[in-house]
Every structure is written in structure tokens, then in C-alpha cells.
Image (cartoon, rainbow, N blue to C red):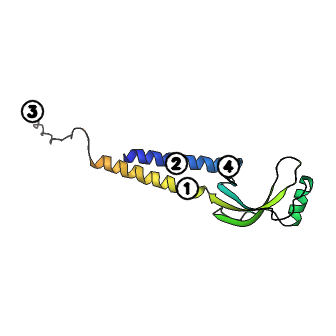
Amino acid sequence: MRFLVAAFTLLLATTSLTLWLLSKRVSIGIIPLGHETSLQIRDGGIFLRRAYAFGIAPAVPEKDWHATATARGWTLPPPTPGFPGFSFHDGLVIGRSSGPGALISPSNFWLLRLPLWPSTLLFTLLAAWLLLEWHRSRQSTRRGFEVQTTPSTPHPAPAPQK
């Protein structure tokens, strides 16, 4: 049983490492999680986004959205310098429309970033510890036959030659 738990933990560590490395190169879609909530894996982290306030300003034509959003400061915060960690931003603005060419209505959302490196490190260390414990328990409960050695009998000394 310990081996299966260790193997599963090692699988989680490998999956987390793969997602972390892959997300450093490409963005893994925007996955809807329910009403106005989505998940995206990118830049070595899992990003959860939830829109909560709609129509916070007058709607803007699609062709003017970028200029209007930039002028009003409705941009994403810059990434934090250094080693990526947890972050939470609230009061961000996203544009929502009913389709191409429609008016874009600004809405508030929050953004939570969960870095993947802690889960990779945690699952790797946990799997190593579980595998070590499994190995120790196997060594302590010997299986099979116990081999007993008997002391070798000394050979008689050769007789002196005359």
C-alpha cells in the first residue's frame, strides 16, 4: 500500500513538473469553471479569474476598446520581479461583448496566481520520503529464506616431507 501511495505521489510530482515546464513555453487554454470563472495555465502558474461586477462604465465600440482601456489604466499589473510566487489582484477590468463588432462593456474581475513550482517540490519530496519509508519497511521485514553461514573448518596442515 505504501508503494502505491508513493507511486501516485510521484505521478503527481511528474504531472506538476510537466505542467510547470510546458506552461513556461505555451499557454494552456482558458478553461471555464462555471459562471464567470475560468482557469488558465501559463507562465509557470495556474491563474484563476472571476468576473463579478458588470457594466462598470459605458460600453465602448470594439475598434476603440484598446485605446480606451489603456487610457483609463485598465491594464494587467506587471509581473512581479524575482522568483514567481502567489499573487492576488482585485478590481481589474476586462471587456465583455456579445460577439464580433458589438459594443464592449467593461467588467471587474479578480485574478489569483498559484505557482506550480511549490506543488512540484512538495510532491517530489513527499514521493521521495514515501519511497524511502517503503524501502525501509521492506528491509525490516525480510522475505524468503534466511541464510546462515557456518564457520569454515580449518584444513589440516600438510605433513612435513622427509
Residue type at numbered disc 2: Leu
- Is 128 on the left-hand or right-hand side of 159? right
Distance in Å between CA atoms under marks 3 and 1: 79 Å
Residue type at numbered disc 4: Pro
Residue found at x 87% / y 63%: 58
Look at mark 4 in the image and give the residue it sits on. 32
User: Badge 1 local density, few (<14 within 10 Å), some, or many (20+)?
Assistant: some
Distance in Å between CA atoms under marks 4 and 2: 23 Å
User: Badge 3 local density, few (<14 within 10 Å), some, or many (20+)?
Assistant: few
- Whole-percent x, y for residue 39 in the image: 66, 52
Residue 77 visible in this rendered orientation of the protein: no
- Is 69 on the left-hand or right-hand side of 145? right
Of the two numbered discs 3 and 1 in the rendering, the one whose residue sits closer to the viewer: 1
As rendered, which of 20 and 138 lies closer to the eye? 20
Distance in Å between CA atoms under marks 1 and 4: 22 Å
Residue type at numbered disc 3: Gln
Please report contact status of discs 1 and 2: CB closer than 8 Å, yes or no: yes
Please report contact status of discs 4 and 3: CB closer than 8 Å, yes or no: no
Of label 1 and label 4, which has the lower sequence position?
4
Residue found at x 90% / y 60%: 67
Residue found at x 81% / y 62%: 55
Marking on residue 119: 1
Mark 3 residue element: loop
Of label 4 and label 2, which has the lower sequence position?
2
Look at mark 2 in the image and give the residue it sits on. 12
- Whole-percent x, y for residue 63 in the image: 92, 53
Marking on residue 161: 3
As rendered, which of 51 and 144 lies closer to the eye? 51
Callout count: 4
Quadrant of res 121? bottom right
Residue type at numbered disc 1: Ser
